[in-house]
Amino acid sequence: GAVVSQHPSWVICKSGTSVKIECRSLDFQATTMFWYRQFPKQSLMLMATSNEGSKATYEQGVEKDKFLINHASLTLSTLTVTSAHPEDSSFYICSARILRGTYEQYFGPGTRLTVT
Amino acid sequence: AQKITQTQPGMFVQEKEAVTLDCTYDTSDQSYGLFWYKQPSSGEMIFLIYQGSYDEQNATEGRYSLNFQKARKSANLVISASQLGDSAMYFCAMRGGTGNQFYFGTGTSLTVIP
């Protein structure tokens, strides 16, 4: 149980375009999902916390108008990178949290974004 | 503020030997959780083991054990009988803060030598 999927697993887009990444909890409901960004050989950096039915909470330094997060249902959160630039190229990972026990986060397999 | 420190950027271990990956943390929370994740080159984050701040016994999961020393604020991961498939990045994480967020260390790259 506790499977999180991400789509797409990799995407290449041209500079100036927007790209949407989906994060789904497949067998459980997640009121809270998280979006992370990871540069090569570096740690995961929390970008934002996504709560179902409310606005996302962004970490300091993350542009909320550039990284649009929507958590419309208990099983789906989306991250849209708007007007993408080459510096947005990164590995984006989502996670979903279960509100019981250890408050463990279950991670998606990640999406590799390359902006040309 | 919460902080996780992993001081070993890279580690090598001989196959079938044990290895310890270090992790120290800093928090003022009374209740927190400590996690270890494995990230192979494919990028997925694989949960390995969990230790709660109130757990008195060290957590174990198969070949993984967590050496929890609360007073020293350390949560080292011990992998016994290393296998070639253990080669990966390993991240220590702490759940804490007002939002029960995860705070990750910088990771340790483990290479198992045949």
Image (cartoon, coloured by chain):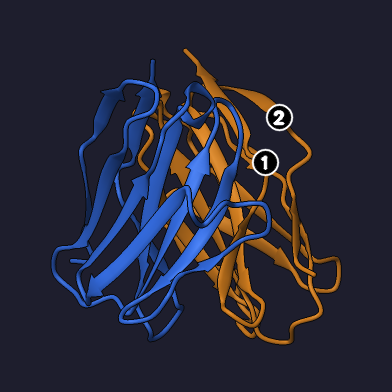
Q: Identify which residue is drawn at 26% across, 29% down.
A: A10
* Rendering coords of residue B9 (x, y %): 71, 29
Element at badge 1? Answer: loop
What residue is shown with label 2?
B9
In this view, A106 is above or below A98: above
Element at badge 2? Answer: loop
Q: Which mark is residue A66?
A: none
Given the image, on which type of amino acid does mark 2 rest?
Pro
Q: Earlier in the sequence, mark 1 or mark 2?
A: 2
Mark 1–mark 2 Cα distance, whole angstroms, equals 8 Å
* Rendering coords of residue A6 (x, y %): 23, 47
Q: A46 or A99: nearer the eye?
A: A46
What residue is shown with label 1?
B106
Q: Is residue A79 visible?
A: yes
Q: Identify which residue is drawn at 66% across, 26% down.
A: B11
Q: Which chain is orange?
A: B
On the rendered structure, is B20 left or right of A11? right
In this view, A28 is above or below A45: below
On the rendered structure, is A112 left or right of B86? left
Badge 1 vs badge 2, beta-carbon distance below 8 Å = yes
On the rendered structure, is A11 left or right of B93? left
Q: Identify which residue is drawn at 45% across, 77% down.
A: A103
Q: Residues within 10 Å of mark 2 (few under 14, many from 20)?
A: some
Mark 2 falls within which chain?
A: B
Q: B22 or A101: nearer the eye?
A: A101
**Quadrant of the image containing the N terminus of chain B:** bottom right
Q: Which chain is blue?
A: A
In this view, B24 is above or below A83: below
**Front tag of 1 and 2:** 1
Given the image, on which type of amino acid does mark 1 rest?
Thr
* Rendering coords of residue A24 (x, y %): 20, 60
Instruction: Count the labels in the image.
Output: 2
